[in-house]
Image (spheres, helix red, strand yellow):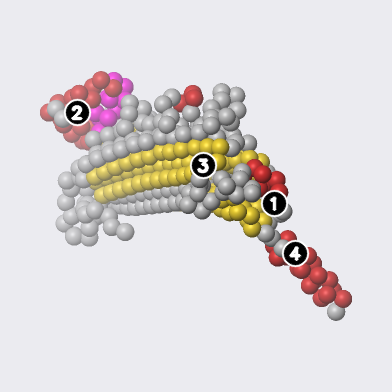
């Protein structure tokens, strides 16, 4: 009985701050007219309601649990003086603001909203413009970044920041955001168990999504379009990449997706369309590529060195200049049940699988790797004869690299 009363008392004490939480309204003509003043006066777990208007403030430091809610999208103008909002407390919500004019620095990564060593935070439904970094999470955990619009005006990589950055953070949901015209749309470093879904990352200088040394992450149903070099996933493992669209990432060294030193990961039901390279892979192993569409790319997949024990199955390769470019004479990967638009085999028993194996690597792709200028001969008769002779007697491409069960019709899922 005593233990029961102690338990009830503990629950009551935990709820006291919430039960006695207050709401403070801020406007330009109110008694409290600045967000900084309201934050200083507020008690833990209070709500600060900010009315429509423009508030010229920066270095707003939040060190207690608070909900700061904008009504009518009030503008917080940092006047290019530095960082605008810094959160250093658990259980903070920032919602419904237009935040503009973050300061630019070559020594400090100023952000519109920074979260430092905090848990259970929510940053949602904000518009961030004219910024250096947008939302910067630093050693933050168990939070949400939802439905924000982040638009920079980046011109050069050296003097621009990232839209959403996570550094040494974990168990964060990044959902429904639109990021454009920054350096990297979304950037992760040493951040694990991050769920990135339903975001649009477009027109960024470098990568739509870029992460390094970050494991057990999932990104699904995102759009990565017209970025400088698409998406880069590097030095990571146990990554799920599913239902994303990689489109119009063009450039001399561009690609839809760069995979470098990746292991034990899955690439499923993604669309790669109109990229210089759909997938560029170096040092990947034990990966599965299934049910992906590669359409109208320069190279659908470009496999460089040290790629072992990977499986490419039930994918569609549709009208790419080169379906597969392969570096090396030995094949350590498996290709099966893919549809190749350039396959002209037959199916006598009508089981939907070609009776003749398909060799997806063209000799001409090997030549253009060595001599890029040779691409001008792509549609010539000479190129066709060269590729035909390589199929009959492989000399420069791995003789065992073939799809033994090519599909006659396009895969559906």
Q: Which residue is drawn at 64% across and 58% down?
A: 23
Q: Earlier in the sequence, mark 3 or mark 4?
A: 4
Residue 351 is left or right of residue 209, and the answer is left
Residue density around tag 3, few if under 14, some if 14–19, many if 20 or more, within 10 Å: some
Q: Nearer the viewer, residue 412 or 141?
A: 141
From the top left corner, tell me how far across and down residue 210 is, in percent.
48, 37
Q: Is residue 366 found inside the magenta-colored segment of the image?
A: yes
The residue to which callout 3 is attached is 54
What's the CA distance linking mark 2 and mark 3?
58 Å
The residue to which callout 4 is attached is 16
At numbered mark 4, what does the secondary structure look like: helix, strand or loop?
A: helix
What's the CA distance linking mark 2 and mark 4?
73 Å
Q: Earlier in the sequence, mark 2 or mark 4?
A: 4
Residue 72 is left or right of residue 408, and the answer is right
What's the CA distance linking mark 3 and mark 4?
34 Å
At numbered mark 2, what does the secondary structure look like: helix, strand or loop?
A: loop
**Residues marked 4 and 1 touching at CB (< 8 Å):** no
Which is in the foreground here, disc 2 or disc 3? 3
Q: Which of marks 4 and 1 is nearer the N terminus?
A: 4
Residue 394's disc is none
Q: Residue at x 46, y 26 (%)?
A: 157
Q: In which quarter of the image is the C terminus?
A: bottom left
From the top left corner, tell me how far across and down residue 312 is, in percent.
37, 47
Q: Which residue lies furthest to the right in this view?
A: 2
The residue to which callout 2 is attached is 378
Q: Which residue is drawn at 76% across and 68% down?
A: 11
User: For residue 297, what is the image quadrant?
Assistant: top left
Q: Which of marks 1 and 3 is nearer the N terminus?
A: 1
The residue to which callout 1 is attached is 42
Q: Quadrant of the N terminus?
A: bottom right
């Amino acid at each position: 009985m005593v233990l029961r009363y102690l338990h009830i008392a503990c629950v009551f004490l935990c709820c006291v701050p919430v039960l006695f939480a207050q709401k403070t309204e801020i406007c330009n003509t109110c008694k409290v007219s600045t967000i900084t003043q309201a934050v200083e006066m507020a008690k833990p777990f209070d709500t600060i309601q900010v009315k429509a208007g423009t508030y010229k403030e920066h270095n707003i430091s939040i060190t207690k649990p608070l909900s700061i809610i904008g009504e009518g999208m009030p503008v917080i103008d940092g006047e290019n003086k530095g960082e605008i909002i810094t959160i250093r407390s658990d259980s903070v919500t920032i919602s419904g603001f237009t935040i503009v004019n973050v300061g630019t620095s070559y020594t400090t990564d100023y952000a519109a909203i920074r979260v430092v060593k905090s848990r259970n935070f929510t940053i949602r439904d904000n518009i961030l413009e004219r910024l250096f970094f947008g939302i910067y999470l630093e050693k933050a955990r168990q939070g949400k970044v939802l439905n924000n619009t982040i638009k920079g005006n980046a011109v050069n990589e050296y003097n621009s920041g990232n839209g959403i950055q996570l550094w040494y953070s974990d168990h964060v949901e990044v959902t429904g955001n639109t990021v454009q015209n920054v350096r990297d749309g979304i950037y992760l470093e040493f951040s694990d168990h991050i769920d990135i879904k339903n975001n649009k990352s477009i027109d960024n200088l470098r990568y739509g999504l870029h992460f390094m040394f970050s494991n057990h992450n999932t990104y699904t149903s995102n759009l990565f379009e017209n970025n400088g070099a698409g998406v880069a996933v590097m030095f990571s493992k146990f990554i799920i990449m599913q239902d994303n669209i990689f489109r119009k990432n063009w450039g001399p060294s561009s690609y839809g997706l760069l995979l470098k030193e990746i292991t034990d990961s899955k690439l499923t039901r993604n669309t790669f369309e109109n990229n210089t390279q759909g997938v560029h892979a170096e040092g990947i192993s034990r990966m599965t590529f299934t049910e992906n569409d590669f359409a109208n790319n320069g190279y659908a997949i470009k496999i460089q060195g040290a790629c072992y024990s990977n499986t490419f199955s039930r994918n569609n390769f549709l009208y790419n200049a080169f379906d597969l470019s392969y570096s090396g004479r030995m094949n350590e990967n498996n290709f099966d049940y893919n549809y190749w638009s350039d396959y002209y085999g037959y199916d006598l028993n009508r089981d939907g699988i070609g009776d003749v194996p398909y060799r997806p690597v063209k000799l001409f792709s090997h030549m253009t790797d060595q001599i890029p200028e040779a691409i001008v001969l792509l549609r010539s008769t000479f190129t066709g004869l060269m590729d035909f002779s390589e199929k009959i007697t492989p000399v420069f491409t791995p003789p065992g690299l073939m799809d033994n069960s090519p599909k006659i019709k396009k895969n559906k899922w």
